[in-house]
Amino acid sequence: MAKSSRTGSRDTEAGLLQYLRYEFQRAANPKNAAVMQAYMKSTMPFYGIQTKERRAICTRAYREFPLGSFEEWQTTALRIWREAQYREERYAALELTGYRAYRSFQILETLPMYEEMIVTGAWWDFVDVLAKERIGLLLELYPRPMRKTVLSWSRSENMWKRRSAILCQLGFKKVTDLTLLYACIESSLSSKEFFLQKAIGWALRQYAWTDPLEIKRYVRENGESLSALSRREALKNIGEV
């Protein structure tokens, strides 16, 4: 049972972080770590733990150290994120934010935490999970306020917030808000940033599984504005217009 006092909360936070680091150190593979760090082009080192094993460690940790309130959950996730010394620790923070036992904590008040993780994570392995699985969920649950937020992010000076705005509807399929999607894309059409061009193409390609004719129409009408990369990605599975 989670402890309810603030002292108990601090003990739980510290215990969870200590448990994760201990188990991650035990599972560390230096050979894998070097390869993973090079692939991810990361300045933060890796322990070298494969995804399946890392998730199993996280699951055991979250069962061993249950968090009794929204505040405790959010504080713990941010502590793991901010104090991370290895990339797997930040992955663990992301796992905690999406852990099924805390599904009811996905409320608008989580937005500043996710925004911090997007801005400070500043790389696709963090940002894409947050965009699709966290920001997308908030948009689904709170469409009116989140629509305003997503539109604002699409015009941000921060590239990763822009990418998040473009990608947050990846799993929406038939309920995709096309007006919102196209508005988020429009803000970055002239960008030369690879990660924005790639995001535009990915978002269009994903919706093409639902309505290929609509995406062909969009590409045809916006062909001069779309980068070659975005166009190629958008039409990857449906052929040329």
Image: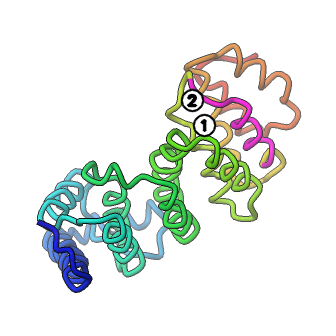
Based on the picture, tell me whether residue 65 belongs to the magenta stretch: no
Q: Is residue 96 left or right of residue 42?
A: left
Above or below, 216 relative to 190: above
Q: CA distance from mark 1 to mark 2?
A: 6 Å
Q: Amino acid at mark 1?
A: Trp
Of 8 and 139, which appears nearest the observer? 8
Mark identifier at residue 206? 2
Q: Which residue is labeled 1 in the image?
A: 202
Q: How is the image coloured?
A: rainbow
Residue under the point 77% across and 55% down: 155
Q: Determine the residue positioned at 27% across, 48% down.
A: 100
Tags 1 and 2 touching, CB below 8 Å: yes
Front residue of 111 and 120? 111
Q: Secondary structure at mark 2?
A: helix
Q: Is residue 159 above or below residue 78?
A: above
Name the residue nearer the viewer: 234 or 159.
159
Q: Which residues are magenta?
A: 175-187
Quadrant (top left, top right, bottom left, bottom right) of the N terminus: bottom left
Q: Residue 144: horizontal and vertical position, in percent? A: 64, 42
Residue 24 seen in this snapshot: yes
Dot label at residue 7? none
The image shows residue 15 at horizontal and vertical percentages of: 18, 79
Determine the residue positioned at 32% across, 57% down: 95
Q: Residue type at mark 2?
A: Gln
Q: Is residue 35 visible?
A: no
Residue 172 placed where, x, y %?
53, 31
Taking the spot 57% from the left edge, 29% from the top edge, the residue there is: 206
